[in-house]
Amino acid sequence: MDDSRPRVAVIGGGWAGLAAAVRLAKAGLPCRLFEASRTLGGRARRVPWKLIDGREIALDNGQHILIGAYRETLALLRELGLDPEDAFERTPLHLIGANGLRLEASMQNAPWHLLAMIVTARGIGIDERWAIASFMLRAKKIDWSLDVDRSVTELLKSWHQPDPLVHKVWAPLCIAALNTPVDGSSAQVFLNVLRDTLGAAARDSDLLLPRIDLGGLLPDTARRFLEGRPGAASNAASTVTSTISLATRVQNLLVDDDGVSVASGTATDLGEPERFAAAVVATPPSEAARLLAPMALRDARYRTIVATCEGFAFQPIVTVYLLYRDPPRWPSRMLLLDAAPHVDHFGQWAFDRSERIDESTGMPTPANGTGLVAVVISADGAHRDIEGKDLIAAVARQMAAECGMPSRPLDARIIVEKRATFACAPSLARPDGSTPHARLVLAGDYVADADRSTHYPATLEAAVIGGRRAADALLETVGRASAAA
């Protein structure tokens, strides 16, 4: 490695930090990536599970669905040598419920694919089909943009959506996309998501369900690239070698016009500060606020950024994994459940994760010949007061009642992310990623510019976009400074 190259610190090894580090390394700038945990991937990572019979399989800490319109994420995976056609099962947009609901887009060009979905819908009446069409026409007429943001509940009510349709379709879609209850969800962000799914071209609205665990998607491939090793599916490797420091928490930052000093270690045992040409803070907003707070004491320009980062609330996601003797026989790998907390039916979506990629052959195979189902409970709710073993039992009973699965799975595991996503509230204040010093930028799914039509909820695409934009901003700054020197 050329030691004269300016180095960049990337603080945070989630998808935003990895996207930023890859972008910088591809441009010839080596990075040191600091990650406080022992695993890359942030809230979209691999989790090992040792089964009751001693076998070990890989789980995801949550279920993440991509759509065809996630261009930045798909482009990043291709750059790293991972073919999305192999890594994902790609299907036309569909919504299939355990209660008989069936909405399936065709493969025709827009808007005919959506018209086919409405015409062929099952499980909803004529009035409800017309309400969906009316909603879409009205959203398109206003170019998917509201003059004033409001809650999704208020939007649906003012646009005359029937209560049964809200319960069966709109509320589940909102909670799945924004991970925020409909009463407190941003209608503008919900419209942005619908624009890129229901209102998009057929190919853009395709659903992409991962065939491999989340660690195999970005964290593993990005790590190989950054460390200069060939990628899994190609010889993609960085021309500069970066350093990845796991279980290393950054304690202090000091920024000036010439660069950034980074001190890592424990609160009582700081290491020697390390100097970098620039830094990306790709942490959750609360951690970004902690790192920027000392600068806010000395520089009033940082106070608004810190206050904005401290202003985020968060919502949980619970994933219950159930292992069965046989894989389920569903019409789709993703099934909408009829959530009814008053009868202990807490599950909202079920995913068939029985299929795995055999690393030796690269082909999809059943997971050890057994059925693996992931049941997701998004956002806050009554389930938060139930102990893990009791919640597992309730979800297993729900799967038996709604989907005909055995009432007693072979094994089960629950994963709780208490701060899985930021609460996507109406008119939520979000930082744009810049700071008073051009050599220090923020990245993450919570970062957004002033254009509300681009605001996304806490998704992988939002994280990747934030990381790549942060890297581009630093490339311009560091490149300009290097040229001047």
Image (cartoon, grey):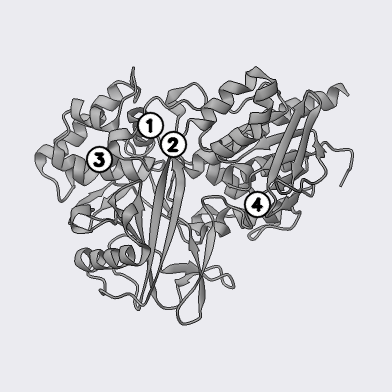
Q: Can residue 236 be seen in this snapshot?
A: no
Local secondary structure at mark 2: loop
Task: Place residue 455 in its image quadrant.
Answer: top left
Of the two numbered discs 4 and 1 on the same chain, state the one appearing first in sequence: 4
How many other residues sit within 10 Å of disc 4, few (<14), some (14-19) or many (≥20)? Answer: many
* Distance (Cα) linking label 1 and label 3: 17 Å
Local secondary structure at mark 3: helix
Which residue type does callout 3 highlight? Trp
Of the two numbered discs 4 and 3 on the same chain, state the one appearing first in sequence: 3
Q: Which residue is mark 2?
A: 313
Which residue type does callout 4 highlight? Ala
- Cβ atoms at labels 1 and 2 below 8 Å apart: yes
Horizontally, is 472 left or right of 465 in the view? right
Of the two numbered discs 2 and 4 on the same chain, state the one appearing first in sequence: 4
Residue at horizontal 74%, vertical 57%? 229
Q: Which residue is mark 3?
A: 170
Camera-side residue of 34 and 366: 34
How many other residues sit within 10 Å of disc 1, few (<14), some (14-19) or many (≥20)? Answer: many
Q: Which residue is mark 1?
A: 425
How many other residues sit within 10 Å of disc 3, few (<14), some (14-19) or many (≥20)? Answer: many
Camera-side residue of 259 and 121: 259
* Distance (Cα) linking label 4 and label 1: 32 Å
Camera-side residue of 342 and 34: 342
Q: Which residue is mark 4?
A: 222
